[in-house]
């Protein structure tokens, strides 16, 4: 089981962490809410929890709680630009059905 | 599909819950819009990656308009319908506008605010500003993928209420909810994180394209107070271009230029200025229509020399602002640089030398105001963790003030002021030799102390004995973002100080607040009469005090007959002052005043004769200082 960051995403996360001045890495996860079942969680991580599973991708530490991992296994987090907008995007192979907003999905 | 941003731990918003808010720097020359992405403030650029939007609007005969670079490009072509620098007209009447004869616009005088006649109809500055704001809103919505909940818009610290209101109206017209108007220097300070810094005084040096502003800010308990502002509304980066332009003409020994050649050289001058900052030497070459060829090298040394007087011109207002704030250079804890023109090394050096410290300049000086506004907007929009409710109060629900002599209320911070806010006012003593005074802090809209809610009392002791009205006591009210009120009083000559902290909204329900407001409306007329009576009573008391003390010190100037007459006048005034007939009190005061005229003149003569300063006719008249006075502690 693994979750990875694209090189571009890793670069952005690393620079955000430096500018933020604290944090050990990036926390990914899911929550049951949203218009389409579960929603992504994308946060800075300041501390690791006991049930966290850790990955390392392009030098960035990624923390995922054990319950969320099945929903995210195989996901690559990418950083893209669409028109004027730029930000992170989950490329998640588990998704069967996503809400148009991209913030929540179904497996 | 919206792209995601990284949130703070535990603060991931539910889908569609992240509130999109922006900060807008609505500038005279250029405007910007910024937002917070993944915890960082960033400026939103247009499709071509350009962060700035020139604050220029062009109107077409069909009523449509275009904003920004396209409009700017047509400025020379269609001067009457291309409106630039509209910020200078916001909230201003026709007569307020300087140099309007040199502007290409067709001004229309209108009540309140000037209008501009264009091919698309008569436009108010508010409408023109709204067109700029609308362009920024559309840019932000395209970039953020949703509707904005609101914006923080920056305004110069010296903007008055009319100019601020005009800015708010423009935002409403542009379909943009205003979360707050923020002072530009404060926004710059926030961008540098100074709001989290230790308390202290900061200077914000803002040299833009065509304007120069200096602001002195005092940060305490997370609230910025503007202590002084100054500047020059006709000094900016453009003047530096002009200096280079003149130097080119002289150095290349050019004949008088055609308009096209002049425009070309002015552009070359600006390019050279921008190239010079990172490179130290800038080549200038141009082939003019006249056939002449320009091939020069501008060095930093030459540029520094030819622009010396311009740089010096910015230091004058800085000195004045410091003087206005009653501060010296050593009181300034940090200097923030704003505006593209502050990139020039000679400006950096001059400011550094004046303040004897390296100015803060690691953020892009063109963007720093917008970045600070975005940070503030993000907080105000509520993109914070649950339970973190530090922005409970947005405005003060009831006025805050203090008790002056006679049980009257002097409002210091009016109702509906947005917080954080800080205001100060000077008061004075009521009696000769008064060494202590009572500060009674109240909340409410009514004129008399008994009808308002008492919040706190404290005393200021150790005032040096002076004649009534001579002491200068500065009382400062400050409400921080949590709605906490701190009141401090200090006597300015001796420096004695006292202070207290209260939470004004505590314990008042919405119903109570509504009740207090309703009361104030139904009692307005009643209150005004009662206030006038009280004021007359206080004045009478003050006059009696002054006459009695004058009689004590210079009683030998009075004949026995005069003394008896004066004493009977005083006694009569004392009795009428106890009653409730304001007219009788004023009449009795007039009598006493008439009776003392002769006495006052003689005292005056004596004091002049003795070349004895400090005692004057004003002592007898109760002091000419118009400050309200505060009573002694019971």
Image (tube, grey):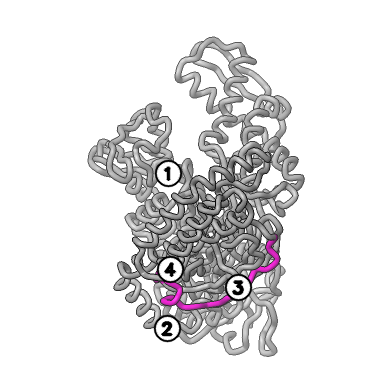
Q: Earlier in the sequence, mark 1 or mark 3?
A: 1
Tell which tag, 2 or 4, sits nearer the viewer. Answer: 4
Q: Residue at x 51, y 37 (%)?
A: B233
- Asked if disc 2 and disc 1 are in contact, CB closer than 8 Å, the reply is no
B101 relative position to B426: left or right = left
**Which secondary structure, mark 3?**
loop
- Asked if disc 1 and disc 3 are in contact, CB closer than 8 Å, the reply is no
* Label 4, label 1: how far apart the Cα atoms are: 59 Å
Identify whether A23 is placed above or below B168: below
x, y (%) of residue A45?
65, 77
Magenta range: B445-464
* Label 3, label 2: how far apart the Cα atoms are: 31 Å
Viewer-proximal residue among B512 and B89: B512
Q: Which residue is label 3 attached to?
A: B633
* Label 3, label 4: how far apart the Cα atoms are: 24 Å
Q: Which residue is label 4 attached to?
A: B575
Viewer can see residue B373: yes
Tell which tag, 4 or 1, sits nearer the viewer. Answer: 4
């Amino acid at each position: 089981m693994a979750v990875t960051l694209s090189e571009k995403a890793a670069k952005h996360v690393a620079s955000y962490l430096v500018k933020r001045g604290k944090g050990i890495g990036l926390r990914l996860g899911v929550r049951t809410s949203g218009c389409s079942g579960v929603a992504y969680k994308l946060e800075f991580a300041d501390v690791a929890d006991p049930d966290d599973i850790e990955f390392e991708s392009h030098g960035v530490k990624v923390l995922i709680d054990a319950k969320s991992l099945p929903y995210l296994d195989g996901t690559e987090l990418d950083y893209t630009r669409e028109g004027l907008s730029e930000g992170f995007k989950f490329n998640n192979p588990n998704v069967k059905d996503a809400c148009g907003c991209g913030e929540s999905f179904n497996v | 599909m919206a792209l995601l941003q990284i949130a703070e731990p535990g603060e991931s918003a539910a889908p569609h819950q992240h509130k999109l808010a922006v900060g807008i720097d609505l500038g005279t020359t250029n405007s910007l819009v910024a937002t917070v992405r993944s915890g960082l403030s960033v400026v939103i650029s247009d499709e071509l990656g350009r962060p700035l939007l020139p604050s220029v609007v062009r109107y077409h005969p069909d009523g449509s308009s275009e904003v920004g670079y396209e409009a700017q490009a047509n400025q020379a072509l269609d001067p009457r319908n291309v409106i630039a620098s509209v910020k200078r007209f916001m909230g201003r009447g026709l007569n307020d506008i300087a140099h309007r004869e040199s502007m290409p616009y067709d001004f229309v005088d209108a009540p309140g605010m000037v209008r501009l006649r264009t091919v698309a109809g008569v436009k108010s500055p508010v409408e023109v500003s709204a067109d700029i704001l609308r362009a920024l809103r559309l840019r932000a919505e395209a970039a953020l993928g949703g509707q904005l909940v609101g914006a923080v818009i920056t305004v110069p610290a010296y903007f008055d209420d009319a100019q601020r209101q005009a800015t708010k109206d423009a935002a409403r017209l542009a379909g943009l909810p205003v979360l707050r108007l923020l002072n530009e220097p404060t926004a710059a300070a926030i961008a540098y994180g100074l709001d989290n810094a230790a308390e202290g005084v900061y200077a914000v040096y803002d040299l833009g394209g065509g304007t120069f502003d200096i602001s002195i800010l005092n940060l305490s308990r997370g609230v910025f107070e503007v202590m002084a502002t100054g500047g020059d509304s006709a000094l900016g980066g453009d003047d530096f271009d002009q200096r280079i332009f003149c130097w080119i003409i002289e150095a290349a020994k050019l004949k008088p230029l055609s308009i096209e050649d002049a425009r070309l050289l002015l552009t070359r001058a600006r390019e050279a200025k921008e190239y010079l900052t990172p490179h130290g030497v800038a080549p200038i070459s141009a082939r003019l229509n006249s056939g002449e060829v320009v091939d020069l090298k501008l060095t930093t040394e030459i540029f520094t020399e030819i622009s010396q007087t311009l740089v010096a011109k910015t230091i004058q207002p800085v000195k004045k602002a410091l003087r206005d704030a009653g501060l010296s250079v050593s009181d300034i804890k940090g200097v923030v640089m704003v505006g593209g023109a502050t990139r020039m090394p000679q400006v950096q050096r001059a400011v550094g030398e004046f303040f004897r410290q390296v100015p803060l300049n690691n953020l892009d000086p063109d963007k720093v105001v917008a970045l600070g506004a975005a940070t503030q907007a993000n907080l105000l929009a509520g993109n914070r963790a649950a339970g973190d409710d530090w922005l409970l109060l947005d405005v003060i629900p009831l006025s805050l003030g203090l008790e002056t002599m006679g049980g009257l209320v002097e409002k210091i911070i009016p109702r509906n002021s947005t917080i954080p806010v800080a205001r100060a006012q000077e008061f004075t003593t009521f009696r000769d030799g008064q060494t202590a005074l009572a500060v009674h802090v109240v909340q409410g809209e009514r004129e008399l102390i008994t009808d308002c809610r008492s919040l706190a009392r404290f005393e200021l002791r150790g005032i040096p004995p002076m004649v009534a009205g001579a002491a200068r006591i500065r009382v400062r009210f400050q409400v921080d973002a949590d709605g906490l009120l701190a009141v401090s009083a200090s006597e300015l000559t001796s420096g004695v100080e006292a202070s207290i902290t209260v939470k004004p909204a505590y314990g008042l329900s919405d119903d109570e607040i509504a009740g207090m407001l309703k009361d104030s409306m139904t009692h307005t007329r009643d209150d005004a009469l009662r206030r006038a009576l009280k004021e007359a009573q206080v004045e009478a008391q003050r006059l009696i005090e002054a006459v009695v003390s004058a009689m004590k010190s210079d009683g030998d100037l009075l004949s026995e007959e005069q003394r008896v007459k004066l004493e009977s006048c005083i006694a009569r005034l004392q009795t009428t002052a106890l009653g409730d007939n304001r007219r009788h009190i004023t009449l009795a005061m007039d009598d006493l005043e008439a009776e003392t005229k002769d006495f006052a003149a003689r005292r005056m003569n004596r004091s002049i004769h003795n070349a004895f300063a400090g005692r004057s006719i004003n002592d007898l008249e109760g002091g000419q200082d118009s400050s309200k006075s505060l009573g002694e502690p019971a």
